[in-house]
Image: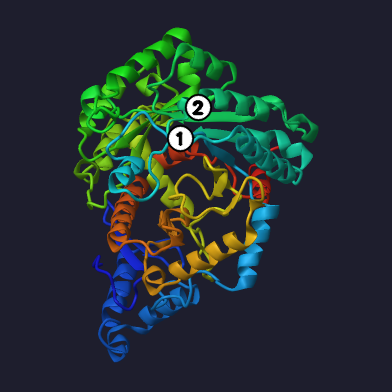
């Protein structure tokens, strides 16, 4: 079957797996079908003929072929054209979503921007780029007030305990394991306001969590930092309060220092190596159980050198010598249409074939996958595809790729304004810590977002279910705006490659699918009702 995009069937995409099996993905039904050679030929002829004239279809397809096509279409597969809408834009649907958010959505975390100041000027950072251009969210000099920080935390506390009350008592311990209360500290560089972070974390810990059946020690704290300001004093506080610590660090100094630099342009790599050594000296246990490294896959890095560097820093089974090493995608905030050629050319099939040839199974296969950070990161993209695909054909369209606005996550900026999350450009607040969430603003944001994804461009995109452009990412200068065409093209290309790899794994080494279930098991639920359905399915008692 040809891999072309059919004009009259824009939601149809076909793929050929390793063994020659053809898979049809239908973006309307959101389902993959594995086709026999005969079925593949029938569908190929049907699609091709529909690009010419309707009369030819009946001439060139047998009655059995026609019956097969009609059977698929009765199940909402292989339906021509695009849906009239991708999501219901009516006010009553938006009201339903709002009510579900307020009464059922899990409040995952609150993130506090302690300061918008930073001691670095990383070359790929949006703050640095906007500072250079004189627009957008840029580095500044403001800091969050203790009063605003405490109000933000108290608002989150109230949201969390209200929802927690809807969890059946026999399941609450398991719910807390999957969805603990989470408070994050962010910048700028958060450690520039270490004293404020100490005050706010102590305030959060002192709230009456136990009155609502939540053990105090279940409250989780997290800080994201560039690591350069971490001292023994600060580290001891993080250890004593069981903070999760994420350090942004891109690899060996000769690579890291191409982008991650101080204000004077000096690289940060050597300093971070010293900091990691300090953490290991003071508490190797904390390093291996609480510390993560977040490394950006920037286009100007030698990824082979980066991967080799982190492997050489491994302690026991811990790659990079930390709890977890995460590679994250580069975002081209300069809009130079840069794409990482090394990442584009990354071929996970070669790695999978090597594992297959080694005869790895079960726990040994799992360990091998976990020990390869780049492979693990790419497999996570593939797992997301798997999780978002339906097991039976959809019979209606009403989907969007955003979390519950103002509920799942929310972000408090240095001025006490509330935002959807840290992914926005902070130009469109949804409220403030004093007055709380502004319901009318959030509902209008839904309406604006829905109008965008109901455009013909979005309705006719075969990869719509896998789109990574949520509401927050489309905010620009106080408005929710349509994405650039090149961004959409890049997403479709990436999704297509991920699907090809998913099908290769399914055909060639299906044991990896089982490992992926363990590697990426969902640890946060979207709704309480979804959590209940999950535990009933797995039989947790």
Identify the image quadrant of residue 188: top left
Q: Which mark is residue 187?
A: 1
Q: Which residue is under mark 2? A: 193
Q: In this rendering, which labeled residue sits more in front, label 2 or label 1?
A: 2
Position of 42 relative to 404 (above/below): below
- Which element type, helix, strand or loop, lies under badge 1? loop
Identify the image quadrant of residue 1: bottom left
Position of 250 relative to 329 (above/below): above
In front of the other: 277 or 16: 277
Could you tell me if the residues under marks 2 and 1 are in contact, i.e. CB atoms within 8 Å?
Answer: yes
* Neighbourhood count class around disc 1 (C-alpha, 10 Å): few under 14, some 14–19, many 20 upward: many
On screen, residue 314 versus residue 397, left or right, reads: left
Q: Which residue occupies 71% across, 42% down? A: 158
In front of the other: 241 or 215: 241
How is the model colour-coded?
A: rainbow
Q: Going by the picture, which residue comes out furthest to the top?
A: 281
Q: Which residue occupies 42% across, 34% down? A: 117
In front of the other: 361 or 501: 501
Position of 480 relative to 83 (above/below): above
Q: Which residue occupies 21% across, 34% down? A: 301
Between the C-alphas of marks 2 and 1, the distance is: 9 Å
């Amino acid at each position: 079957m040809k891999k072309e995009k059919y004009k009259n069937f824009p939601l149809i995409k076909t793929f050929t797996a390793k063994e020659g099996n053809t898979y049809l993905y239908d973006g309307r039904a959101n389902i993959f079908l594995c086709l026999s050679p005969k079925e593949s030929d029938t569908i190929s002829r049907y699609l091709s003929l529909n690009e010419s004239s309707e009369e030819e279809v009946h001439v060139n397809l047998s009655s059995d072929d026609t019956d097969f096509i009609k059977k698929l279409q009765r199940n909402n597969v292989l339906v021509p054209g695009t849906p009239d809408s991708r999501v219901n834009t009516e006010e009553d649907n938006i009201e339903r979503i709002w009510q579900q958010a307020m009464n059922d959505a899990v409040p995952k975390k609150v993130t506090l921007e302690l300061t918008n100041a930073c001691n670095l000027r990383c070359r790929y950072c949006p703050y640095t780029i906007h500072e250079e251009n004189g627009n957008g969210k840029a580095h500044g000099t403001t800091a969050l007030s203790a009063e605003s920080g405490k109000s933000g935390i108290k608002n989150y506390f109230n949201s969390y305990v209200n929802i927690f009350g809807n969890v059946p008592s026999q399941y609450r311990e398991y719910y807390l394991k999957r969805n603990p209360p989470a408070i994050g500290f962010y910048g700028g560089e958060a450690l520039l306001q270490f004293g404020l972070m100490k005050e706010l974390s102590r305030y959060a810990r002192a709230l009456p969590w136990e009155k609502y059946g939540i053990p105090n020690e279940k409250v989780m704290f997290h800080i994201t930092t560039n690591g350069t300001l971490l001292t023994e004093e600060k580290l001891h506080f993080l250890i004593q309060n069981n903070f999760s610590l994420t350090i942004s660090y891109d690899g060996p100094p000769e690579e890291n220092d191409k982008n991650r630099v101080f204000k004077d342009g000096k690289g940060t790599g050597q300093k971070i190596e010293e900091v990691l050594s300090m953490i290991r000296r003071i508490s190797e246990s904390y390093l291996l159980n609480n510390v993560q490294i977040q490394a950006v896959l920037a286009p100007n890095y030698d990824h082979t050198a980066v991967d080799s560097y982190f492997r050489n820093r491994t302690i026991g089974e811990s790659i990079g010598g930390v709890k977890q090493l995460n590679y994250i995608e580069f975002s081209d905030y300069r809009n130079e249409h840069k794409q990482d050629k090394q990442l584009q050319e990354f071929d996970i099939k070669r790695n999978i074939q090597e594992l297959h040839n080694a005869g790895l199974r079960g726990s040994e296969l799992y360990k091998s996958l976990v020990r390869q950070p780049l492979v693990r990161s790419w497999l996570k993209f593939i797992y997301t595809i798997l999780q978002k695909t339906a097991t039976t054909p959809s019979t209606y369209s009403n989907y969007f790729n955003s979390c519950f606005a103002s509920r799942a996550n929310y972000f408090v900026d240095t001025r006490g304004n509330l935002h959807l999350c840290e992914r926005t450009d902070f130009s469109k607040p949804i409220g403030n810590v004093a007055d709380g969430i502004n319901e009318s603003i959030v509902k209008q944001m839904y309406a604006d977002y829905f109008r965008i994804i109901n455009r013909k461009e979005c309705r006719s995109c075969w990869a719509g279910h896998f789109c990574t452009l949520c509401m927050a990412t489309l905010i620009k200068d106080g408005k929710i705006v349509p994405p650039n065409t090149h961004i959409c093209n890049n997403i479709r290309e990436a999704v297509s490659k991920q699907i090809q790899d998913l099908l290769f794994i399914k055909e060639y080494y299906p044991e990896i699918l089982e490992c992926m279930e363990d590697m990426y098991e969902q640890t946060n639920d979207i709704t309480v009702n979804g959590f209940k359905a999950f535990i009933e399915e797995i039989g947790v008692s």
